[in-house]
Image (cartoon, grey):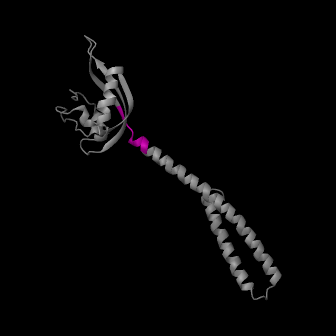
Amino acid sequence: GGRLLQLNAAGRILFGLGERQTLSGLRVIDLIAEEERSRFLRTILPKVFKRGSWSGDITVRNLATGESIPTRHFLFRIDDPVDGRAESFGAIGHDLRDAQRSEAALRQTQRLESLGVLAGGIAHDYNNLLTAVMGHLDLARELTGPEHGATPHLDAATTLAERSGALTRQILDYAGKG
């Protein structure tokens, strides 16, 4: 029981079987990832034979590499045409690796976009604070006059604030808000 009878070219690639490699001796359970075998035998197959079909996600195994491969499968019962008894089942499967990679890339893009929004918000608030600091430095320079001993320190603080403002503009440009 449970012998593998046929496998199309895409199935052979998925499961790591060569074009001319015989299916003799292979069982369906050999294609199921170790961690899924119990669920396959105790839950999925009984549903196929009782209800006539099952569809869902299951991890299979590439026999050549040992790689576990996430798939979405539709399994259906095949009945004997003479007496109508269930005699075997067929399966149509789809490799989910590309879809999962695309979903992961989309999540990464969304995280980067969120980071850009956050950086832009922080940079905007920081820029507002820098504007206030620059105003206070200008006011302090007017109150002390050019000959005051604090003037070089005020000039240095102004230079640092201007450099900070340039950095903030770079962050805003990166975040798309500049």
Q: How many marks?
A: 0
Residue 76, given in percent of the width and then of the height, sits at 33, 23
Q: Quadrant of the C terminus?
A: bottom right
Q: Which residues are magenta?
A: 93-100
Residue 175 appears anywhere in the view: no
Q: Quadrant of residue 147?
A: bottom right
Taking the image as shown, residue 62 lies to the left or right of residue 73, namely left
Q: Is residue 97 magenta?
A: yes
**In the figure, 62 relative to 161: above or below?**
above
Residue, x 58% and y 52% (percent of image)? 114
Q: Quadrant of residue 94?
A: top left
Residue 91, given in percent of the width and then of the height, sits at 32, 28
Residue, x 31% and y 25% (percent of image)? 46
State the residue in front, 151 or 50.
Answer: 50
Q: Is residue 92 magenta?
A: no
Residue, x 35% and y 32% (percent of image)? 93
**In the figure, 155 relative to 170: above or below?**
below
Residue 48, given in percent of the width and then of the height, sits at 33, 24
